Image (cartoon, rainbow, N blue to C red):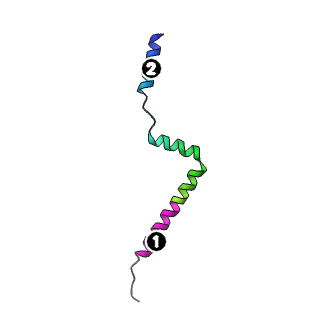
Amino acid sequence: MSNKFISDEVAKKVTPPPSFVKLAMKNMVRKGNQSLSHFGLTALGFLGFILLIAVLGKPHMPQ
């Protein structure tokens, strides 16, 4: 009986903490709709930034 208790105690100590990726995925699943809206806003902001850089960096050709 004591051997089982010791092996359970060792197994608890050996188990590593969850990784940051697992914690982030668990958080995203828990928040759901808010995470999707933030991702959408980030994607739109990034596309807007890329378009702004493309417009400002466009070479002006003489006609």
Rendered view: 3 above or below 33: above
Rendered view: 58 above or below 15: below
Q: Is mark 1 on a helix, strand or loop?
A: helix
As drawn, which residue projects farthest toward the top? 1
Prevailing secondary structure class for the magenta stretch in the rendered image: helix
- Stretch of the chain drawn in magenta: 43-56
State the quadrant of the C terminus: bottom left
Q: In which quarter of the image is residue 38?
A: bottom right
Return the x and y of residue 37 as percentages of the image width and height. 58, 55
Question: Residue at image x 53%, y 55%?
Answer: 39
Binning the other alpha carbons within 10 Å of mark 2 as few (below 14), some (14 to 19) or many (20 upward) gives few
* 31 relative position to 13: left or right: right
Nearest the viewer among 38 and 4 is 38
Asked whether the residues under the numbered discs 2 and 1 touch, taking CB atoms below 8 Å apart as contact, a structural biologist would say: no
Residue labelled with disc 2: 9
Return the x and y of residue 40 as percentages of the image width and height. 55, 58
Q: Quadrant of residue 19?
A: top left
| Residue 52: mark in rendering | 1
Binning the other alpha carbons within 10 Å of mark 1 as few (below 14), some (14 to 19) or many (20 upward) gives few
As drawn, which residue projects farthest toward the bottom? 63
For the residues labelled 2 and 1, the Cα–Cα distance comes to: 58 Å
